[in-house]
Amino acid sequence: MNDLYLIGNGFDLAHGLKTSYNDFLLWYINNALHACNGKGSFKDELIAINRDGYQYSSLENYISIKEIMEDMKKMRFSIKYHHDFFKSIVENCWEYKWVDIEYEYYMALVEIFKEMEKKGTIRSDFHFTQVRVLNDCFENIREKLIKYLNTITISELSQINRIGKKLKEYTGIDASDSGKKLILNFNYTSTIDLYYDWNFNKNDY
């Protein structure tokens, strides 16, 4: 009997990697705030930050979105969001310490469709523009997420032996036949590549 493993971001999290959307947003806003502190302003496709007060000699690396936002107000940093979609993502992460960007994207599309239904029209230049703007914002987020993931080192992970042993275990009824290890990988990092030497065949992926 073959064993099928579904690999997602939980696989990275189990290895102790900071690959959640919360980690990504912390990295992004921390970098933006530090850049603004040095230059007086920061602007990209998603946000604009201005420093209304004096330059701080140093800023800490914050560990939560809530902490960043609260300190920004105290230190007279102002933030402007170029997209309501990204603003809602940051605010959800602020309030719940967690956010699912794909789910938020889906719900944003649903809201646009509901507006179209209310107006009794299927085709509308205004709504198509809304979808185009939403997709542009989503693409900008995706590009920055890729940049963040490239900063994460996965060559040495403390959980490899423990997780590798679990992967080598088989779940078949017949314990004398482990079958193949089939892995369906939905993950956006190459963490699973670390296990090629555990008698997994690349052709089984």
Image (tube, rainbow, N blue to C red):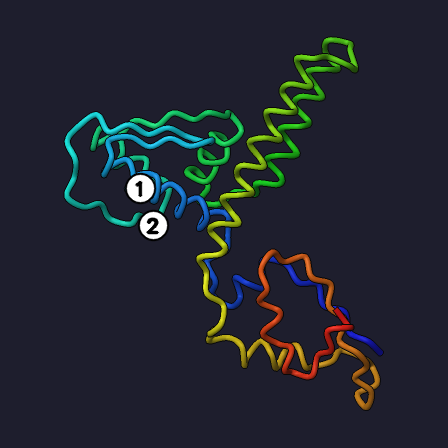
**Secondary structure under badge 2?**
loop
Residue 67 tag number:
1
Q: Residues within 10 Å of mark 2 (few under 14, many from 20)?
A: few
| x and y, in percent, of residue 96 in the image | 46, 41
**Residue at the location (65% across, 24% down)?**
131
| x and y, in percent, of residue 193 in the image | 61, 71
> Which amino acid is tagged 1?
Glu
Is the residue under label 1 in contact with that under label 2 (CB below 8 Å)? yes
**Residue at the location (17% across, 28% down)?**
53
Q: Quadrant of residue 40?
A: top left
Reply above or below: 178 against 127: below
Q: Quadrant of the C terminus?
A: bottom right
Q: Quadrant of residue 196?
A: bottom right
**Residue at the location (69% across, 81% down)?**
169
| x and y, in percent, of residue 12 in the image | 55, 63
Q: Is residue 205 left or right of residue 108?
A: right
Residue lying furthest bottom in this view? 176
